Image (cartoon, grey):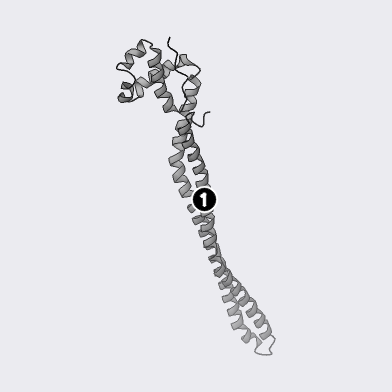
Amino acid sequence: MKLYADLPGRRATQVVSDLFTAGWVIACTYAGRVVHDSIATLRTPAAGLSDAGSQLQSGMNSAGDQMATVPLVGEQLQGPFREAARTGVALAQAGTDLGSAVDRLALALGIAAAVIPIVVWVLAWLPVRWRFVRRASAAQRFLDGPADLDLFALRALARQPMHRLARICDDPAGAWRAADPAVVHELAVLELRDCGLRPPPAPTIG
């Protein structure tokens, strides 16, 4: 598998792109963590509400138990404290529910802040890189020597723009059919450069 081009300029661009992608993933992951932690600080009031409810419940139950010891009217005095204790239970549960909601929101927004920009970039970057790797790897398997240039020259005749072919000679197709080694080499160079491969040296004519 060929991951990078042979041509220095294109290879440098690919390396920079890959390094940027790695840095982008790290930066987005960090940003997601910051978002999560920022929202998670909202859990502090929820925890305080839960603690206050628990303390109210405990205090009212304790006071109710004390009132129960009062002769004759203890039962009647105990009732309001039991009601207040139930209010404390409700407050504690509300604080717990609020804390759970904050945790879920922090997790969801933190993941979204990290994943969405990563996915957007990867969807733009990965197809380009995969297309190169697939094309260059396939072309590399056919590039064993000068004799294989004929295949790439034929592909150049079929795929390259007319103005690029015209720069090689006035009749590139005819020269290819005549097996002109210089023209075949120049045609193959066009295709190989598009694949990111370095062509073999030009044939020596003499």
- Position above or below: 190 against 20: above
Amino acid on which disc 1 is placed: Ala
Q: Which residue is mark 1?
A: 27
User: Observer-nearest residue: 58 or 117?
Assistant: 117
- Nearer the observer, 18 or 8: 8
The percent position of residue 17, horizontal first and vertical second, equals 48, 40
Please, what secondary structure does the residue beneath circle 1 have? helix
Left/right of residue 167 with respect to residue 97 in the rendered view: left
- Between residue 132 and residue 19, name the one nearer to us: 19
Q: Residue furthest front?
A: 206
Q: Quadrant of residue 131?
A: top left
The x and y percentages for residue 168 are: 34, 20
Furthest toward the bottom, the residue is: 72
* Number of on-image labels: 1
Q: Is residue 109 above or below residue 81?
A: above
Residue 111 vs 45, above or below: the answer is above
Q: Specify the quadrant that holds the C terminus.
A: top left
* Vertical arrangement, residue 163 with respect to residue 31, above or below: above
Q: Residue at x 63, y 76 (%)?
A: 55
- Quadrant of res 175: top left
Q: Position of residue 139 (x, y in %)?
A: 47, 23
Residue at (36, 14) in percent of width and height: 176
Packing grade of label 1 (10 A; few <14, some 14-19, many >=20) is: some
**Residue 80 at x, y = what percent?**
59, 83
